[in-house]
Amino acid sequence: MLLRRSVRHGIALLTAIAGLPLLLVALLRPGWRVGLAERLGSVEQLEPGSIWIHGASVGEALAALPLIERLRASGCRVFVSLATRSGREVMRRAMPDLPCALAPLDHPWSVRRALARVRPEILVLVETELWPCWIAAARRGGVPVVVVSGRLSDRSFPRYQRLRWLLGPTLARLDAVGARTQVDAERFIALGVDSERVSVTGDLKLDPGDGVAHLATDLVRALSEVMVFVAGSTHEGEERTALRVLEHCEAEGFPVGLVLAPRHPERADAVEREVAETGRRLQRRSTLAGDVLATGDVLLLDSIGELAALYATAAVSFVGGSLVPVGGHNVLEPVFAGCPVLYGPHFENVRASVELLEESGAGRCVADEKELARAVEEALADPERRRTRGAEGRAALELHRGSAERTMALIASRLPPEASRWAPATLSSSRDGGD
């Protein structure tokens, strides 16, 4: 035991020394200094007993909201961490009173400090946040670790298989995995997770939840005089494609405006320059002052947390990361809002969602710019059909309602016995059935 501890401390020291150059760079660059203390484990000091939920970015933050709402409604204390600043911003906007921070770096010193300050009852990792040092430190501290909405994509699974020898000890420390689908469950088992610890609880992103996104009044006004085509979560190259699609639609006589919502808001300046090259009038969300979009105008969404509500105003939408080889993003968000959705052929990360949408008719894959333009024009030309597609997609998602409750029951089943001193009956009663 003493030897193992000495080895761990030695490795931690060596990795800290190796990381000093990066730390110095971070200190010298103002943008990198934001949140650095949190990255090093200096998060808010909390009373012991919280459920610590961690997700990677915006998508995971939004997916976790129904679960967090239910846990808090049951009387549980919740702390949330996100790997990105944009994810943290979304969570803070959605729940201003929720303790929330950037996740600690996966280094023994950072995670140990963060765990000591949060003192959680359980650590809940959303999707595939399998950080070895963090998971090991939690287990050494007697904190159960549960993966929820667990996924292993077509692209990542072969990579994990090749690294099974390295990933094995981390997976063996997991107390439970709530997988999105049976395929995901089988993949976790194939990588070495005990089959008795794996169950299918569903995809949190498929749970419609109870919340309704409301659009700010100035945005309602700005989009009131045109049909709206929203290109959301776009990457480099996809904005230019959307602009050419807008040109096609204008040529066909449709009174349509374009909303561009880049996946990474820090790309807003580059996207603005790209729009300027086309000669089109552009309005940035951050400087919108009572302006109204006319046919052919572009609204650049450089804010965070408003895209879901914007989909509700759209005649048709496109979700990016799919015409370029990224793997796709949340194609369900438009459908939650009743809007039919288009996406490119690179949807490996959201394959289950795509299959669901194509079965219902709410989603359609387009191979390239030409097909995207044709699909957008068809949607604009047939308002009754697009409303039907949106409604059918929303109904299909309703069939998957309940993944948040199943996930909550899984968390309850892994809470330590002493957690009953604060866990309400509605949460702790599900523990009797186990997993």
Image (tube, grey):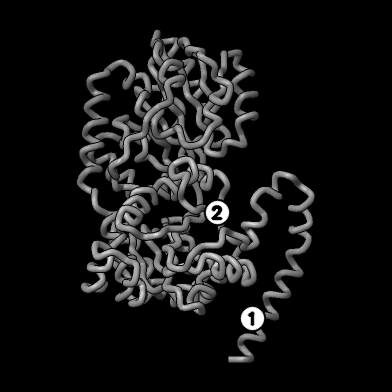
Tell me the kind of residue under disc 2: Ala
Q: Report the residue marked by disc 1.
A: 8
Provide residue 8's location: percent of width, then percent of height. 64, 81
Residue 415 in the image: above or below residue 321? below
Q: Callout 2: 10 Å neighbours few (<14), some, many (20+)?
A: many
**Residue 291: which disc?**
none
Residue in front for this viewpoint, 366 or 118: 118
Q: Callout 1: 10 Å neighbours few (<14), some, many (20+)?
A: few
Residue in front for this viewpoint, 29 or 424: 424
Tell me if 406 is positioned left or right of 16 in this view.
left
The Cα atoms of the two marked residues, 1 and 2, are separated by 26 Å
User: Which residue occupies 57% across, 26% down?
Assistant: 286
Residue in front for this viewpoint, 271 or 8: 8
Residue at the extreme bottom of the image, as rendered: 2
Q: Is residue 300 visible?
A: yes
Q: Is residue 346 visible?
A: no
Residue 207 in the image: above or below residue 7? above
Q: Quadrant location of residue 23?
A: bottom right
Tell me if 117 is positioned left or right of 250 in this view.
right
Considering the image in quadrants, where does the C terminus appear?
Answer: bottom left
